[in-house]
Amino acid sequence: MMGPTRNGAQLITNTQGSASGPQPADFTDVRATNLAVVLRFVRENAPCSRADIAATTGLNKATVSSLVADLIDRRLLRETGLTENRVGRPATMLVLDGSPYAAVGIEVNVDYLTAVAVDLKGEELLSWRRSFPGGSASPGQAVAGIAGVARRVVNRMTKDARQVLGLTVAVPGLVDLNGSVRVAPNLGWRDVDLAGDLAKALRDPGFPVLADNDANLGALAELRFGPHRGVQNLIYLTGEIGVGAGIVLDGRLRRGGAGFSGEIGHIEIVPGGPPCLCGRRGCLEVVAGLGAILARTVPGGVSPEELEPEIDEVVQRAEAGDPTVLALLDTLAENLGKGVGIVANLINPEVVVLGGYYVKLAPWILARAEQEMLSRTLAPGGGGCRLVVSGLGYGAAALGAAARVLDSVDSGRLPAPA
Amino acid sequence: MMGPTRNGAQLITNTQGSASGPQPADFTDVRATNLAVVLRFVRENAPCSRADIAATTGLNKATVSSLVADLIDRRLLRETGLTENRVGRPATMLVLDGSPYAAVGIEVNVDYLTAVAVDLKGEELLSWRRSFPGGSASPGQAVAGIAGVARRVVNRMTKDARQVLGLTVAVPGLVDLNGSVRVAPNLGWRDVDLAGDLAKALRDPGFPVLADNDANLGALAELRFGPHRGVQNLIYLTGEIGVGAGIVLDGRLRRGGAGFSGEIGHIEIVPGGPPCLCGRRGCLEVVAGLGAILARTVPGGVSPEELEPEIDEVVQRAEAGDPTVLALLDTLAENLGKGVGIVANLINPEVVVLGGYYVKLAPWILARAEQEMLSRTLAPGGGGCRLVVSGLGYGAAALGAAARVLDSVDSGRLPAPA
DNA sequence: CTAGTTTGTTTGGTCGTTAGACTAACTAAC
DNA sequence: GTTAGTTAGTCTAACGACCAAACAAACTAG
């Protein structure tokens, strides 16, 4: 009695934010959806044959042939002469064509920029780290500096005969849905239209330029490159002086009404605890951010520029069994677990990924934090929520920024055929 | 250089939860999407003409005619002979056809059931409240009781020549994505396959039977019937002895990995605070749930069965200016504000709606809670998040359960033509 | 060398959308 | 009252994308 029995799919295109009213669909949408379906299938099952695709997706063999031809025209797929060795006609296998395109991500930090370029497969083509006076320069100078790096990356890609599909910039701060940075305390920015200014500075670059929060992009990186790829609901926590969360629900980044979701750092964890820069006390950031240990282990306070060596010192002392450090780490883990518990209760993700410097500290904090989280969730077993450590290293946000570009390709924004 | 410029729409069908792999699209999806587009357009702009629909949605006039004919066949739309009075040929206006269908929602509570039926427009056809030994009966008896009410509602609808499009049941507890109740402390339930058992008890009812958490459905009710209809991101908080959250992001309910999102009630708000039934201390539920006031204003403790008169007593004493009650309400508001602040920071919704008995207490708690929330959000002005009170009254979850049925119609699950 | 199997293309058909011509039904103005 | 102008909705032809089934191609097995 109900309509069609077939479970219709979502036409996956870029309905990013922006209260898009009733959007009708037509054939081009169907085509775009199915192209994306095939592309993603090959990404996850390469090498595979047209017959495999048809069998698994349910698309007709003829349709698959047509879609694959289109994707080959667009240089997104490639036939590998390789065939299998079993009964029946051998199959011509398909793989992603890594060579003609690049997705670029840049991560802005207080004292350095990280630039990453990946090919369609997500394989790293380039990974630069440049010092950068983010904390001291004016926003205008900073944009110019970022644009400079972007230009050099693009030139390099062009020299390698790759077309850049897009550029995304990760910023530690509040970024609205238009890619405008509203507040970035560590950089001292306020209302900087980063995406717009950067596009201007690059003079009609021919590819989309976007900006987003570093935690959001970290989440995207985990979603695409992490070990939990298939997961539909995932939270990523940045582990720096500040703590931010990137929230993926039902397979997509959720940015909230104004794009300001994920501000977990200033949730009160320890009432009356140590003061925070935001003017309140006991924020997650002060009791589970890196400052919580560094302030008490490193004489003379914390400077963002010296973060890495200072963390290394903490790690050394922990390895040596320094009881002060171990106690501090235990408290940090407990507080972090409280924060993760809040997220697990409220959002019930399959996995919470700890990023940034939490990775280095994992041996001393992970178990404790997970225990704390589990003891605080109402749903049995934490509602199936696991707490894990990122394996992506420091450039996670830059990698996520590049992933953001790949996502838009996977969602149907394909480059035109030659 | 990028592909098609037209912003493709999401084919809106039921990809509810369930890690749906790559779902290809075909014509039926396009048709379903466009039928839904027209249906929703008429819902929001009735009465309107075919020409209006074509002009606003961008669909071709011929297509709109075909879609409208289809919807009229399915008795979802109706022509009102009414025409306008301006230059040119007069238009035949279209409205939703309220008469042939009904969507049914039932809310299970500790001591009563609420049943609601609405027509396609969302207009209430029926609203029953029956006492119900939810707290004391066995799950089997309870299911039988719910089935009994459901049968009577369906009979009534059938007598009125209405076809029931679906039944959804709201339960205060953890409901997984299959409509199975995992834990419902107040009802004493554990692992009850409510949706399945109910469908069985109704013997192949010919319409889908679903179950969901009451907070989730409250959120849906607000989304459809509340004053913030257009909003894409909304949180609904139930105000009972327990406190639960329903989370709508990007226009859809987000249930989390296992369907257990929204368990805000057991987030620690006051460390070392009063003990909670869950075994911990200072949970939102004990410091901002109704128990927080009732335990100290009503002698002899709180019984769920007597909730309403007891709350009324609190309201009376607050109106009379009783300083004890006012102080308790102020503390409750402060704690509630802390909880809302967490949500606002983490999720950044446009609006947080307080439901249940919070509505009656609003005059004494709303301002204080909002102030507390605003003081705790990092984004300026709470990231644009407003705190408001529900206007839907007690049956909100039941209404939301019915809305759940209408949603599935709006998403393309249309009844077959006659 | 034949039978069997599997791949991928070709052919014909269907469905739903589109553009544009066309009819219908009205207002306004002479 | 006629004519011009305007808007609504239908009709026709064409197109684009998918599907089913037949078919050709290329292999293994015996």
Image (cartoon, coloured by chain):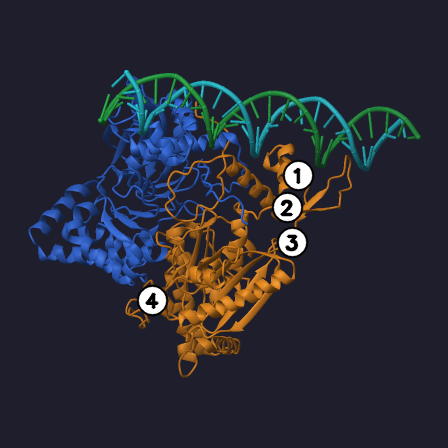
Chain colours: A blue, B orange, C cyan, D green
Q: A227 above or below B103?
A: above
Q: Residue B52 carries which label?
A: 1
Which of the chains bears the disc numbered 3? B
Same chain check for tags 2 and 4: yes
What residue is disc 2 on? B45
Q: Which amino acid does label 1 sit on?
A: Asp
Q: Which of marks 1 and 4 is nearer the N terminus?
A: 1
In the rendered image, is residue A106 in sight? no
Identity, as a three-letter code, of the amino acid under mark 4: Cys
The answer for how far apart the CA atoms under marks 1 and 3 are is 21 Å
> Residue at coordinates 32% horizontally, 59% vertically from top-left?
A268
Where residue C21 sits in the image (x, y, percent)?
71, 22
The residue carrying pointer 2 sits among few (fewer than 14), some (14 to 19) or many (20 or more) residues within 10 Å by Cα, namely some
How far is disc 3 from disc 2 in space, using C-alphas? Answer: 15 Å
Q: Which of marks 3 and 2 is nearer the N terminus?
A: 2
For disc 4, the marked residue is B283
Q: What element carries label 2?
A: helix
Instruction: Give, as a three-letter code, the residue at label 2.
Output: Asn
Which numbered dot is residue B98?
Answer: 3
Give whichever of discs 1 and 2 has the lower sequence position: 2
Q: Where is residue A274 in the image (x, y as percent from the top left)?
A: 25, 58
Q: Residue at x 19, y 43 (%)?
A: A307
Please say if the residues under marks 3 and 4 sit with CB atoms less than 8 Å apart.
Answer: no
Query: How many residues crowd around disc 1 within 10 Å: few (fewer than 14), some, or many (20 or more)?
Result: some
Q: How crowded is mark 3: few (under 14 residues within 10 Å), some or many (20 or more)?
A: some
Q: Residue at x 15, y 45 (%)?
A: A310
Q: Which residue is more in the foreground, B128 or A260?
A: B128
Mark 1 touching mark 2, by CB under 8 A?
yes
Q: Residue B9 carries which label?
A: none
Query: The residue under label 3 is which amino acid type?
Result: Gly
Seen as rendered, the residue at the extreme left is: A320
